Amino acid sequence: MKKILIIGCGSLGYSIVQIFKSKKKKILVVENNKSNFDLLKKESGKYFSVFRNLKEIKWDDIKYLMICVKPKDTHHLLNILKDYINKSTTIISFVAGIKLKTIKTNLGLKNRVIRFMPNLSIKYGQSITAVYSNNIVSKEKIKISDYFGFFGTIVWLKKEEDIDFFTAFFGGGPAYISLILEQLQNILKKRKIKEIDSNTLVLKLLENTLNYIKKEKISFLSLIKRVASKGGTTQQGLDFLKKRSQLNLLLSTAIKKAELQSVKMSKKKD
């Protein structure tokens, strides 16, 4: 039976291992950090096994090799891996900023290489994960999407450069949304409505809004029209936010700056 191997079990790697475990899918783990290894060893069992050394792995059995180390450690690891990897193994890189060309050049092999870029919700199987490869046929893409579907939503990108935008938008998205929610929470706090915790109330507002949109099967714009009656209180607030497209300009500029930073970091790492 072909197996899945992940090398590197920091924050992201650990989340990946946990989602494999929760979905009762088997995975092998290589982790050379002693504290991380000891923690994983205590948790290992039916669904995952942990090793300290690449030599302990039966490489002919590995179908997917997932690389989840820090960018600074990637080049060294790839140079070592070329002596172990079977030619039929598909390599999946979760390393931010390291492009396919760099991975292939360092490996010096003809294995299929894919880049995965998840966001933090992968821990609960709800990630929006960008995927890119330049040598995977459509039929194989479907197989990969099906197999890793338990990560959440898989989005195949047409250009590798789009990973930078994806990182800025979906990677940073939870932080942008949380910032807006924090501002709403602060407004609520100032009104000193203390019967229920302000954090709970704002989360409830978000949850109820999303549930309404899903159950009614409507767009964001349709919801806005339902809430905001002409000349009403909500419309007054919306008119202010829309004035000179301030909100749109702020958000789009923030995401663009994050995207440019991702591009800059990628160039440094390559």
Image: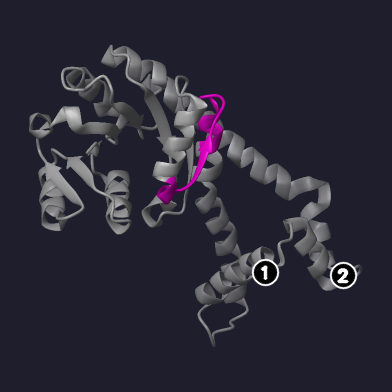
Residue 155 on the magenta span: yes
Q: Residue at x 53, y 25 (%)?
A: 161
The crowding category of the residue bearing disc 2, from other C-alpha atoms within 10 Å (few below 14, some 14 to 19, many at least 20), is few
Identify which amino acid the numbered label 2 is placed on. Ser
Element class at badge 1: helix
Element class at badge 2: loop
Q: Which residues are magenta?
A: 149-166
Expressed as whole percent of the image width and height from the top left, the position of residue 233 reads 83, 72
Left or right of residue 129, residue 79 in this image: left
Residue 7 appears in view: no
Direction bottom: furthest residue: 195
Direction right: furthest residue: 231
Q: Quadrant of residue 159?
A: top right
Which residue position holds label 2? 229
Q: Quadrant of residue 70?
A: top left
Expressed as whole percent of the image width and height from the top left, the position of residue 56 reads 8, 34
Q: Nearer the viewer, residue 131 or 117?
A: 131
Q: Earlier in the sequence, mark 1 or mark 2?
A: 1
Left or right of residue 72, residue 182 in this image: right
Identify which amino acid the numbered label 1 is placed on. Tyr
Q: Which mark is residue 212?
A: 1
Expressed as whole percent of the image width and height from the top left, the position of residue 179 reads 55, 56
Left or right of residue 150, residue 55 in this image: left
Vertical comparison of 229 with 52: above or below: below
Residue 243 on the magenta span: no
On-image quarter of the N terminus: top left
Separation of residues labelled 1 and 2 (CA atoms): 18 Å
The image shows a total of numbered marks equal to: 2
Q: Residue at x 62, y 68 (%)?
A: 211
Q: Residue at x 32, y 47 (%)?
A: 16
